[in-house]
Amino acid sequence: MRKRILYIEDDYDTRNLVKMLLENDGYVVLTASNGREGLKKLEMYDVDLVLLDIMLPDMSGWDIYRRMNEIFHPAKIAFLTIMSATEREIENLKEEGVADYITKPFDNKELIRRVRMIIG
């Protein structure tokens, strides 16, 4: 069974690029352009990975992350954002259960490699 990814990103071009890259690598990719849409899709579909932008128009990626933890959603979570973080901040996030923290702009092959490391 192919792994399913939900990518929550408000930028149309970035959302479509990531969707295309991941689909070309064999994943099923669902997308959402804001937090509310993303949370609805999480209710509707089982996903293996949620890729989250932090800066969304209606709520932050942090809010979505917290909501997922509150409802004990089993999907792995990785941030894909323009916001940089220190190595210590990333270590703290990983200790809290975040699978990865990927910054934009990203190298296409590196993005695929990191997604593979998270969910295979």
Image: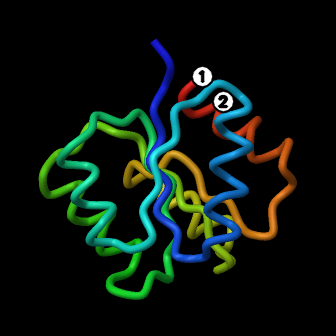
Q: Quadrant of residue 36?
A: bottom left
SS for callout 2: helix
Q: CA distance from mark 2 to mark 1?
A: 4 Å
In the drawing, what numbered circle is on residue 120? Answer: 1
Number of other residues with Cα within 10 Å of mark 1, as a class: few under 14, some 14 to 19, many 20 or more:
few
Q: Residue furthest top?
A: 1
Amino acid on which disc 2 is placed:
Arg
Q: Check if mark 2's residue and mark 1's residue have beta carbons within 8 Å.
A: yes
Q: Is residue 10 above or below residue 15?
A: below
Q: Nearer the viewer, residue 109 or 72?
A: 109
Q: Which residue is mark 2?
A: 116
Residue 76: x and y, percent? Answer: 41, 41
Amino acid on which disc 1 is placed:
Gly
* In the displayed structure image, the side of residue 36 where residue 27 appears, left or right: right
* In the displayed structure image, the side of residue 100 where residue 56 appears, left or right: left
Residue 67: x and y, percent? Answer: 21, 64
SS for callout 1: loop
Name the residue rendered at 65%, 30% in the picture.
Answer: 117
Q: Is residue 81 above or below residue 83?
A: above
Residue 77: x and y, percent? Answer: 44, 49
Q: Nearer the viewer, residue 109 or 94?
A: 109
Name the residue rendered at 58%, 30% in the picture.
Answer: 27
Q: Residue furthest left?
A: 71
The quadrant of the picture occupied by the C terminus is: top right
Name the residue rendered at 84%, 49% in the picture.
Answer: 108
